[in-house]
């Protein structure tokens, strides 16, 4: 049983999110997703996501590629989460390229290319303009 873990905010769910979850799952048998808490997002970006952590968690849990979800409370706890879920592979989008290489003694770290031309930020901008 090969377990893949990934993390993200996944606010205003879009096709880039779906693509990375599908590709992450294809690297193993079981996909676990850490959904960043509202408080973590506020600390990182100084604003709250559009959807609450409970809503984001429910959406991600409903995706067929995802086997289990949890709330990620802090970026610094990645090693703990990896051990807790016995993850073999950590998947991150290549916007994080190199940032999690320090975890490679624990887990196989894989950066996947982002889907071009879409992000939560750009979707919100389009909605604001229309
Ligand atoms: N992701 C992706 N392709 C995109 C957008 C996101 O592969 N076009 C991936 C990210 O690399 C990350 C995961 O989806 O691994 C969750 O990303 P998140 O930061 O929640 O989404 P963004 O759309 O990048 O959000 P924002 O615009 O707020 O930065």
Image (cartoon, rainbow, N blue to C red):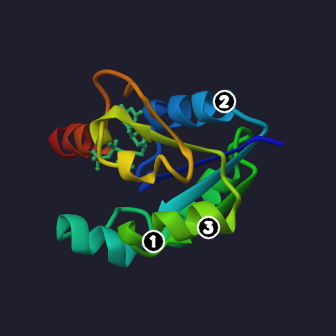
Question: Which residue sits at x=45%, y=51%?
Answer: 10
Looking at the rendered structure, the secondary structure element under dot 3 is: strand
The picture quadrant for ligand 1 comes to top left
Residue 8 numbered tag: none
Q: Residue at x 24, y 45 (%)?
A: 121
Horizontal placement of 129 versus 33: left or right?
A: left
Q: Classify 98 as above or below 70.
A: above
Which quadrant would residue 69 be assigned to in this image? bottom right
Question: Would residue 16 be found to the left or right of residue 39 on screen?
Answer: right
In this view, the residue in front, 94 or 114, is 94
Question: Label 1 vs label 3: CA separation?
Answer: 13 Å
Q: Mark 1 packing: few (<14 Cα in 10 Å), some, or many (20+)? A: few
Q: Residue at x 68, y 44 (%)?
A: 63
**Residue corresponding to mark 3:** 70
Q: CA distance from mark 2 to mark 1?
A: 23 Å
Specify which label sits upstream in the sequence, 2 or 1: 2
Q: Secondary structure at mark 1?
A: helix
Q: Are marks 2 and 1 in contact (CB under 8 Å)?
A: no
Q: Position of residue 89 (x, y in %)?
A: 60, 42
Split into 4 quadrants, where in the image is the C terminus? top left
Answer yes or no: disc 3 within 8 Å of ligand 1: no
3 and 2 marks in contact (CB < 8 Å): no
Say which residue label 1 marks: 77
Q: What is the total number of numbered labels drawn onto the structure image? A: 3
Marker disc for residue 27: 2
**Cα distance between the residues tagged 3 and 2:** 20 Å
């Amino acid at each position: 049983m090969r377990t893949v873990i990934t993390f993200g905010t996944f606010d205003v769910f879009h096709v880039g999110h779906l693509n990375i979850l599908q590709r992450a799952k294809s690297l193993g048998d079981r996909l676990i997703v850490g959904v960043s808490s509202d408080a973590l997002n506020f600390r990182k970006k100084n604003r709250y996501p559009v959807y609450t952590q409970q809503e984001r968690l429910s959406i991600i849990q409903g995706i067929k590629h995802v086997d289990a979800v949890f709330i990620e409370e802090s970026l610094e706890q990645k090693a703990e989460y990896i051990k807790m879920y016995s993850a073999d592979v950590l998947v991150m989008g290549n916007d994080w390229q190199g940032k999690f290489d320090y975890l490679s003694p624990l887990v196989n770290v894989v950066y996947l290319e982002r889907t071009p031309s879409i992000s939560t930020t750009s979707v919100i901008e389009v909605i604001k303009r229309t």
